[in-house]
Image (tube, rainbow, N blue to C red):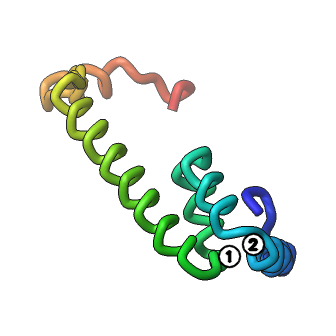
Amino acid sequence: MMTEKGQYYRDTAKYLNSIMKAANQGDLIAVFPMLDLHELKRVIAAGVPGHAMHAANEILQIRKDELSKLVSQQIGKMRVEYEDKTVQEDDKDELEAVRTPESG
């Protein structure tokens, strides 16, 4: 499902849904913690049956909280280096004077 597009995605989602309906709820719930955030979103989108949907949504919320916490921690550590390379008006005149008709 992660790589499928269009109709193939919909067909794969239906297939995954039928597999999840046939599976034991306990087995489904045991697999959810092993999935990453994007995989878990795709599984939920395919339609997790029964009580396993509640468990999947709880795990998804935990993953989102972890991601949010990580991002907020990293923002304080990030440094942005910026160098202003704007050309001053006086420099523009000098650059224009140096150009030849051949150089454009």
Q: Position of residue 88 (x, y in %)?
A: 15, 28
* Residue 93 visible in the shown view: no
- Dividing the picture into quadrants, the one containing residue 11 is bottom right
Splitting the image into 4 quarters, where does residue 21 fall? bottom right
Q: Is residue 35 above or below residue 58?
A: above
Which residue is denoted by mark 2 in the rendering?
20
Residue for point 61% across, 49% down: 35
Q: What residue type is labelled 1?
A: Ala
The residue that disc 1 covers is 46
Residue found at x 59% / y 60%: 29
Q: Of the numbered discs in the image, which one, if any, rests on residue 36?
A: none
Q: In this view, does 101 lie to the left or right of 25?
A: left
Q: Of helix, strand and loop, which one carries label 2?
A: helix
Residue located 30% across and 36% down the image: 70
Residue 72 x, y percent position in the rendering: 21, 39
In-front residue for pair 100/81:
81
Q: Position of residue 36 (x, y in %)?
A: 57, 47
Query: Quadrant where the N terminus lies?
Result: bottom right
Foreground disc of the pair 2, 1: 2
Up-down: is 101 above or below 43?
above
| Nearer to us in this view, 55 or 7 | 55
Q: Is residue 18 above or below residue 65?
A: below
Say which element carries label 1. Answer: helix
Residue 16 placement, left or right of 44: right
Residue 82: horizontal and vertical position, in percent?
Answer: 22, 23
